[in-house]
Image (cartoon, rainbow, N blue to C red):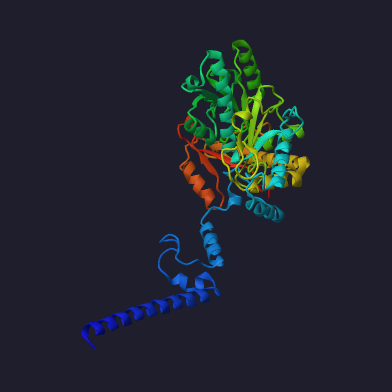
Amino acid sequence: MSSPDKDAVIATLLEETRILRDTVAELSKQVGYDKNLSTTYYASSLAAEPGSLLEEGIPHRGLPAKFVSGYIEDVHLSDFNPRLNTSSYVNVVSEEEERKVAMLGAEINIADASVYPASIILHNKTVNMIAHLWHCPKPKDGGDYTGAGTVGSTEACLLAGLALKFRWRKWYAAKHGLTEDEVLAVRPNLVMSSSYQAAWEKLFRYFDIEAKLYKPNLVKNKMAIDAKELVALADDKTIGVVGVLGNHYNGMYDPVWDIDREVEKVNAEKGWQLGIHVDAASGGFIAPFQEMSGKGCPPFDFRLPNVITMSASGHKFGESICGTGWIVFRQREDLAEHIAVTVTYLGGSSDSLTLNFSRPASGPYVQFYKLLRLGKEGYKQKVENQMSVAAYIRHFISNLMHEPSGKKRFQLLDGGDTCCLPVVSARLNPEIGLHYNDIDMQHALSESHWYVSGKFPPILNHRIVYRAVVMLLVKEI
């Protein structure tokens, strides 16, 4: 055999050997993988491999389902217990039936009305119930109220802001004789309290709207709004005035009833068409039931003639699943119609009123479940319980004394026991000169597994304010 032939045979044998070696190695991995299926992750060969499961990105071979779920559960153990998190407004209580409903909705794309018409009807029924709760005028055509389920109240606020902006743009162009192109060069503004939630920061930045802010004082008047001073910030470039039904610092309600009166005056005096958006992210499912208990405020919703949009987080005191929000419009004409987009490419024709298109039906499903599960009486009793617990905590900490000085240890900063959210807001008394600070106390509380948020309102020069939200599961022991 010639030398070239020998070289060819050797090369072939070497290649076949390499292939065989790779095959054996792959079979060995498969055997090991099959063995892993019959044991736990920590007793498997995978646990002996160096580094994290995700250290090199997506794994070459898929892992057993129980390993992946176990990995996620182990990671979650490093989080705070959501049931002991008093900093959040988000509901974390659910029933087994409710979780099944959520999983059912997770497989439904609520944007596709032609494929899931029954789910759209359920969604619309939920909007109708919420609109009725907020005393929205009945549609002239006798059909459904105009509104939408959203991804949290952030999207709801953005939709309200856009509807107000487009409504104002049409009015401003007509008043000043501007073309559609010319009016685009005019930058509008929105008037509201500086205690707004992050959603409005997104509106100002993303949609080029100037913020004209009224700055209440947390210490002097506990974030109370002077409606006359608030509305006085408006001009003919103002798209609307926002009333916050429960600010996130201390739970106080803006006096929407007083804001409505001032808006009515300025519209009559100056020929404007200012409207009010009620940001009821937290209060939308609290204030109506306080009123049913006889412990509410003056009207705060669509009963006021200048309230034209209202939004809420379903996942807060509406007790729905995280990521649920709602927007309701007084009417479609010259309001919701400005943001409606007709969609035809999913097999039928339907209007979309949301920024997000494809999204699961879990939020509307669970909200519908909760509204039927609790009913008005259930929500009313729930709110009474939450307000009672907030009052108990408030009374307790208000009586804590600093013995060396004889002064109170805490300074209460919330709205009290009525016409506000079930929230307790306080700070360490700055007059008593404690040897520990607010951060030390927050850490001490966390050692008992309770998470109490510390806020940094700019008006307090970055001193911490503690806020405890009385969620559904917090109760006296």
Residue 361 spot, x, y in % from top left? 65, 47
In the picture provided, is 358 more to the left or to the right than 11?
right
Along the viewing direction, whichever of 357 and 344 lies nearer the viewer = 344
- Camera-side residue: 73 or 401? 73
**In front of the other: 55 or 7:** 7
What residue is shown at x 52% (from left), y 39% (from top)?
Answer: 404
Residue 119 in the figure: left or right of residue 436: right
Q: In the figure, residue 223 lies in which quadrant? A: top right
* Image location (x, y in percent) of residue 14: 31, 80
On the rendered image, what quadrant is the N terminus found in?
Answer: bottom left
Residue 39 seen by the camera: yes
Counting the numbered discs, the total is 0
Residue furthest toward the bottom?
A: 1
Residue 18, image x, y percentages: 35, 78
- The residue sitting at 61% across, 14% down in the picture is 266
Q: Residue furthest left?
A: 3
Q: Is residue 25 left or right of residue 130?
A: left
Residue in the picture at 63% in, 42% down? 316
Q: Nearer the viewer, residue 276 or 292?
A: 276
Instruction: Give coordinates of residue 308: x percent, y percent.
Output: 65, 26
Q: Is residue 413 visible?
A: no
Query: Taking 472 as reference, is 166 above or below it?
Result: above
